[in-house]
Amino acid sequence: MAKTSPAQFVREVRQEISKVTWPTRKELTVTTISVLVMSALAALFFFLADQLIAWSIRIILGLGG
């Protein structure tokens, strides 16, 4: 494995960072909102699924009522 000097490493890092396509503020906002909405929908789905399973188990085992 070839050794790289710290100065060479920094040059290569800067060169790679210049290749990165950074999102615009609008893209970042839309993506963030999308992630938050999808996370909330997933949380709601799993909450409802958990409640349904718990209700089914209570009915099957005859608990709580």
Image (spheres, rainbow, N blue to C red):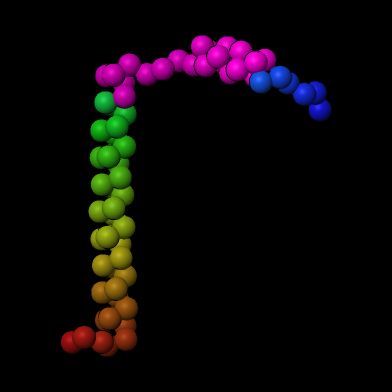
User: Percent position (x, y) of residue 31?
Assistant: 31, 29
Specify whether residue 14 is painted magenta: yes
User: Percent position (x, y) of residue 6?
Assistant: 66, 20
Specify whether residue 23 is painted magenta: yes
Q: Tell me if I can see residue 45 in this picture.
A: yes
Q: Is 2 drawn above or below residue 65 in the view shown?
A: above
Span shown in magenta: 7-28
| Residue at x 27%, y 81% (from the top left corner) | 59
User: Percent position (x, y) of residue 29?
Assistant: 26, 26
Q: Looking at the picture, tell me which residue is in the foreground, 18 or 32.
A: 18
Q: Is 3 drawn above or below residue 35 in the view shown?
A: above
Q: Looking at the picture, tell me which residue is in the foreground, 26 or 55.
A: 26
18 vs 55, left or right, is right
Q: Looking at the picture, tell me which residue is in the foreground, 32 or 44.
A: 32
Q: Is 34 drawn above or below residue 5 in the view shown?
A: below
Q: Looking at the picture, tell me which residue is in the foreground, 35 or 14.
A: 14
